Image (cartoon, grey):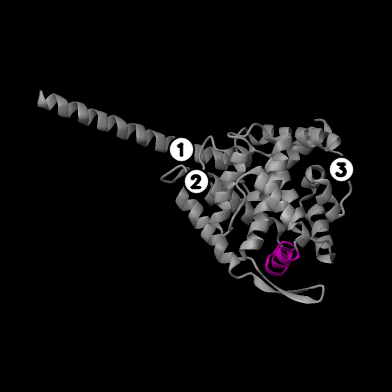
Amino acid sequence: MNPLDYLADAAATGFRKLVSGDPEGQPDWVRELENGDDLGYFGPGSAAWAVHGGLPTIVGGIRALLLQALHPLALAGVQRHSRYESDALGRLAGTTQWLTVVTFGDTAQADRECARVRGMHRKVRGTISIDGVDRDYSAGDPDLLRWVHVAFTESFLATHRIWGGPIPGGEDAYVAEWAKAGELVGVVDPPHSVAELDQQMADFMPDLRYDEATRRTVHFVRQAPLPLAARPPYAVLVAGAIASLTDEERRLLRLPTTPLMFAKPAVGALLAGMGAALGRQAPAQRNARRRAAKIDLVDIGAGESDAMSDSGGRRGGQ
């Protein structure tokens, strides 16, 4: 086995356990995606399914965490009210659950998951000093929620643009669809196009800063306390995340330039190897497709029943 295949196999072996919090990589909430009454807010063939069903989201998630460290109020909520240092994998599993259920669950499942997240946000509030001025923060603040949403959306799109495939309806369709997920957790005025996304990111730039809290967070993200076998492939993914940042974002984060010409093939080969080891579809997407197939069968059966009823009625009247 060559070194890259070894890295891919090691990453695939631990990946589902890391992001799901379940030893088999398929916790109860993933299994539950097979059940439900509708296709959800997006459904098969949607831009959200195409982007979030792909492995580039792993790189996008790392990229988003780096970006979010630049907003002092958003970072205060994470550092003071989450377990990201003591239980980084547990926090990752919680974020993965929200993203996956909203993308692939039916509307009732997505609504319940968003209610869970909103409930957690209500507990996150406090005050920090910025340049000698006390500033209040709250995880339910629509402006902070929009920052988190914009950082995630830009990151998922940027990494999919490099390592993903075609998006049904194009990039604007993805931004517009995922705006709904933002609204479900309280985001006001999320972007609905790439142009709006870029503008909102630019609007946030004056609020972003690098300080000691940012430095610690960036170091933690780059040196995450992962199992030994997962560290080499994770380093490759981090290099890809850094390479996918804009020059301005990288400058603000004080990160070294990682040439995309080197990171792109390395990350691409790793993701391809992970995809081969994990299978063509993740369990969440596979279960959601099974739900969609059941719904289609019910609809077909109902249609045939209606047709037979109509036909019988006509025969009775002849």
Q: Position of residue 175 (x, y in %)?
A: 62, 44
Q: Which residues are magenta?
A: 72-86
Q: Position of residue 148 (x, y in %)?
A: 67, 56
Name the secondary structure under disc 1.
helix
In this rendering, the count of numbered labels is 3
Of marks 1 and 2, which one's residue comes earlier in the chain?
Answer: 2
Residue 74 inside the magenta-drawn segment = yes
User: What distance separates the C-alpha of mark 1 from that of mark 2?
Assistant: 12 Å
Crowding at mark 1 (Cα within 10 Å: few <14, some 14-19, many 20+): many
Of marks 1 and 3, which one's residue comes earlier in the chain?
Answer: 3
Name the secondary structure under disc 3.
loop
Label 1, on which residue? 292
Magenta stretch prevailing secondary structure: helix
User: What distance separates the C-alpha of mark 1 from that of mark 3?
Assistant: 41 Å
Residue 72 horizontal side relative to residue 196, left or right: right
Q: Identify which residue, 298 or 282, lies in the foreground.
A: 298
For the N terminus, give its image quadrant: top right
In the figure, residue 270 lies in which quadrant? top right
Label 2, on which residue? 41
Location of residue 77 with respect to 239 vertically, above or below: below
